[in-house]
Amino acid sequence: MHSLRLRLLVLLSLVLGLAWLAAAWFTHLESREEINRLFDAQLSQSAQVLLATTRHDIQERVEHGEEGVAVHEYEQKLMFQIWDKNKLLLRSAAAPDSPISSAKAGYSETLLSGQPWRVLTRWDARQAFMIQVAEPMAGRESLAQHITFKLLLPTFIVLPVLLLLLWLGIGAGLKPLQTLKKEITQRTPNHLHAVAMAGVPEEVSPLVGALNDLFGRLEQAFNSERRFTADAAHELRTPLAALKIQAQVALRSTDQAERQAALDNVLRGVDRATRLVEQLLILARVDPETAAAHYQALNLHELAATAIKDVAQMAHAKQIELSLEGAPTCLVLGDAMQLALLLRNLLDNAIRYSPVGGRVSVTLHQGPGVALQVRDTGPGIPANEREQVLQRFYRISGSGEEGSGLGLSIVQRIATLHGAQLQLADNEQGQGLLVRVIWPVNNLN
Amino acid sequence: MKLLLVEDDALLGDGVRAGLKQAGFAVDWVQDGLAAKVALDSEEYDLLVLDLGLPKLSGMDLLKSVRAKRASLPVLILTARDTVADRVAGLNAGADDYLVKPFDLDELIARLNALLRRSAGQVELTLQHGAIELTPASHQVRLAGTDVSMSAREFSLLHTLLLHTGRVHSREQLEQTLYGWGEEVESNAIEVHVHHLRKKLGSDLIRTLRGVGYVIDKVA
């Protein structure tokens, strides 16, 4: 049942119905008991009256030795027998010849031709005659039912009205939910502010709190997405401007060398824009949705070896010595493609910023956690800029290299998704940068 | 015209410098805000072309400090940010004009010429001096209605002298105006340009004040 209102109505109706049935049952019992008492009293009175009115009659019959005489009074509604010891002196027409009830005194019930009868057995004052007066139970039962029915009849009429009132009442009670619904439907991805908690019923306030949390997180995500798109567009504008200007300079130049230089710059610009677009795509693909679920155990050492092979050509061109040291098996849980990207970006940066003839080394440590270290012999990153370089599109001025400003952002994002920390430090082995990616506790365990 | 270009992007800066040089501007190019400040403190510029996203000292802060010292220097902003708020902020901080990247070289030159014209208090598009007409936008010089061809440097020299007729420009000032940093200036370069201009436009146009400099007298 999906409507809370209907659900409440049905539940309340059931409870109400049960209460009504119980009330009906008790009313019925009570009235039957009352009727019994009343009828018994009547029965007892009848017995006394019968005894009194028939005393003379009985005396005569005892003296004349008559027995079993049936009189026509009272007919079916009431039957009686008057016994003198074991002799039936007098009986009503419908009464049998044998004792109606085997009870020697008081009230009893018995079956006569399949019908239940209430019987009162009494003795006269001298204990000489016994009278049994019987009355069919059926009358009592139907009367009790009748009374019960009469008592409950108004509630039958009131019930539909009650249900209607309940329906309306529940609707009014659920009004805050309607208001809340309206309030929430107004939210759009551009408009995700929190729902005001004032006036929110106690029962739904945890729900609203959770929703507000979600709204907050969504808004943050949307904002960061928007900011990223805007940043990316702006970042593309500068290389495009450079391309356009360089092309125009080449077109106008009358000097062969100048034109050549400008055209070379156009090509460099295209390469740079291409790289920027590639990095943007990577950053967009490394999204948290693909995380955790299909992580598998990976050997960082193998991944690092592959990454080193991939950049070997680039390193060779700058006569940079590459090395891989440390634990030959270094297991972490993760996404193979993303970790390869992380390694690739770190190596790319290291080679890019190392001078010709420099050294780039990758070291792996497996302790309680796992540490990946990449050292280069480049200019390093000043301590006060180490936080900023992790921001998207931040470039260190005067580095002479034209990165996309995204490499370390990509590394940072992948590391975070894998529960690892990214640290930048001075290369303690001399000039250069040391990048550490640390899995605090081996995420395999 | 001496111009300071402040642009941190190497390819773009290089392109703008080359393009403006082709158009006859003497361009000094720096890649960060602090270097720009030093350059502005040590040299006289006719124009400042400024990127806003600069390392070390932001374009906005640089602009404010420039305005505090030299209220009249024409400043054009190159920016990747094109929201109204960005533009308003730039103009409010004291920029005279802005261009959103990517921009057209011709538009940049046209806007720079317009800024120069305005800063010289000149309203007409063409500078007129006797029979000589100089149109910066089209890089055209006419003498009595006939086109006169000349090199970018000769044009720039004539432009400078015509913009401030009656004012004497020293040889050093003119060298600075015509050549950017790192460009080799022969010791007699200005004399050579003046010589060429005299040959093309008449020997009495530019007057030499020995040991002081050169001047084009106001038309009486």
Image (cartoon, rainbow, N blue to C red):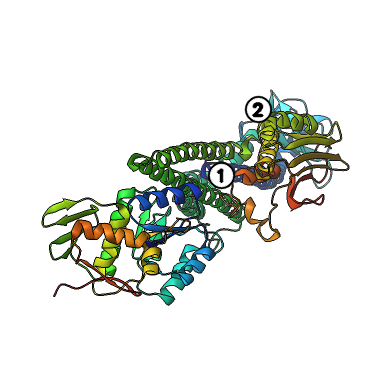
List x then y, in percent, for residue B198.
Answer: 23, 60
Whether residue B69 is situated above or below residue A10 in the rendered picture: below
Q: Is residue A43 visible?
A: no
Does B105 appear above or below A327?
below
Residue beneath disc 2: A94
**Who is closer to the viewer here, B87 or A6?**
B87
Residue furthest to the top in view is A113
Q: Is residue A348 or residue A443 the one in the foreground?
A: A348
Residue position marked by numbered label 1 in the rendering: A404
Q: Quadrant of residue B208?
A: bottom left
Q: Amino acid at mark 2?
A: Ala
Looking at the image, which is closer to me, A357 or A413? Answer: A357
Which mark is first along the chain, 2 or 1?
A: 2
Q: Position of residue B1 (x, y in %)?
A: 34, 62
Q: Chain of mark 1?
A: A
Residue drawn at 75 percent across, 33 percent down = A304
Cα gap from disc 1 to disc 2, whole angstroms: 117 Å
Q: Nearer the viewer, residue A166 or A310?
A: A310
Q: In which quadrant will I find the N terminus of chain A?
A: top right
Q: Are marks 1 and 2 on the same chain?
A: yes
Residue A1 shown left or right of residue A426 in the figure: left
Dot 1 falls on a residue whose secondary structure is loop
Q: Where is residue B194, by image quadrant?
A: bottom left
Residue A294 falls left or right of residue B124: right
